[in-house]
Image (cartoon, rainbow, N blue to C red):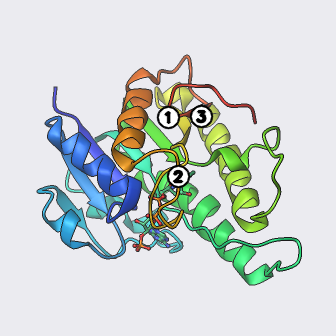
Amino acid sequence: MSKNVVIIGANRGIGLELVKQYKAAGHHVIAMCRKSSKALSESGCEIVENIDVTDDALVENIAASVPVASIDILIHNSGILDPDTINSIDFESMRRHFDVNSLGALRTVLGLQSKLKNGSKIGIVSSRVGSIDDNTGSNNYAYRVSKTAVNMVGKCLSIDLKDAGIAVALLHPGYVRTEMTKHNGHMDVDESARGLIKRMEELSLDTSGIFVHTSGEVLNW
Ligand SMILES: NC(=O)c1ccc[n+]([C@@H]2O[C@H](COP(=O)([O-])OP(=O)(O)OC[C@H]3O[C@@H](n4cnc5c(N)ncnc54)[C@H](OP(=O)(O)O)[C@@H]3O)[C@@H](O)[C@H]2O)c1
């Protein structure tokens, strides 16, 4: 059955691939981004531009730009990574990461809440490097802290939205060859997106609040 799927951060990388795969599976895909790309424009999905997840006004106005009455699957994928070390901490960069990577997901979910219904599912693309338990490598303070914070955002949402029948997953896409990783990684976007879509299929109210790898491995916080 065709579902209404909204992907935020859809113009390149993992988000773009999610758009392509959901579209190829016959779903109605609405791709949200700051600015479209050639590849996104050629995907045949509906595109909503000028969605910058740092904009507080999204909470009030993003729902009006979604051309469907209800959303079955919402994936918040937008994210940034500017590397740092203990010797190069930049507090402005830390604030920017928190704004995009942590608050961004909260803004879009709050803004789209009116379009979510019993049975809707939310996937927030986080990262394994936000896991405190898994941190053996240090570095990337801004990115790590922001992803730890978005995990808490997602966990809170999973609790608050449960009575409404809405399930939430925190998704680790794997180490994926995209612009963010300067095309280093363990997998390409097609493998990552395939797994993420499978994880969204499996997600239920019983597993809501899960932090899960694209492979299906459940991750520690
Ligand atoms: N690649 C990996 O190995 C990996 C691993 C763990 C987690 N992740 C997460 O996976 C997600 C996708 O990453 P990717 O690898 O596909 O990276 P990417 O190719 O750099 O894509 C990042 C996406 O986020 C969007 N974005 C950034 N700032 C935004 C803003 N203020 N408002 C709206 N959209 C914004 C970008 O849009 P613009 O073109 O407008 O900048 C782009 O669509 C991110 O959340 C990332 O943290 C990636």
Assign the C terminus to one quadrant of the image: top right
Q: CA distance from mark 1 to mark 2?
A: 14 Å
Of residues 88 and 163, the one drawn nearer to the viewer in this rendering: 88
Q: Amino acid at mark 3?
A: Ser
Rendered position, 54 above or below 220:
below
Mark 1 vs 2: CB contact within 8 A = no
Residue type at the position of mark 2: Gly
Q: Is residue 183 above or below residue 201?
A: below
Q: Secondary structure at mark 2?
A: loop
What percent of the width, then of the height, locates residue 49?
28, 72
Residue at image point 84% right, 46% down: 136
Residue 44 image label: none
Q: Secondary structure at mark 3?
A: helix
Choose top left, top right, bottom left or bottom right for residue 207: top right
The spot of residue 72 in percent (x, y) is 31, 36
Quickly name the residue at label 2: 185
Q: Residue at x 48, y 29 (%)?
A: 164
Residue linked to disc 1 = 214
Instruction: Tell which tag, 1 or 2, sits nearer the viewer.
Output: 2
Crowd band around label 3 with a 10 angstrom C-alpha radius: few (<14), some (14–19), many (20+): many
Cα distance between the residues tagged 2 and 3? 30 Å
Residue density around tag 1, few if under 14, some if 14–19, many if 20 or more, within 10 Å: many
Give the residue furthest to the right. 87
Identity, as a three-letter code, of the amino acid under mark 1: Thr
- 25 sits to left or right of 184: left
Disc 3 designates what residue?
Answer: 158
Q: In the visual, does 141 lie left or right of 74?
A: right
Sequence-earlier tag: 2 or 3 = 3
Residue at image position (63%, 70%) is 99
Alpha-carbon span between mark 3 and mark 1: 19 Å
Q: Confirm whether residue 69 shows in the render.
A: no
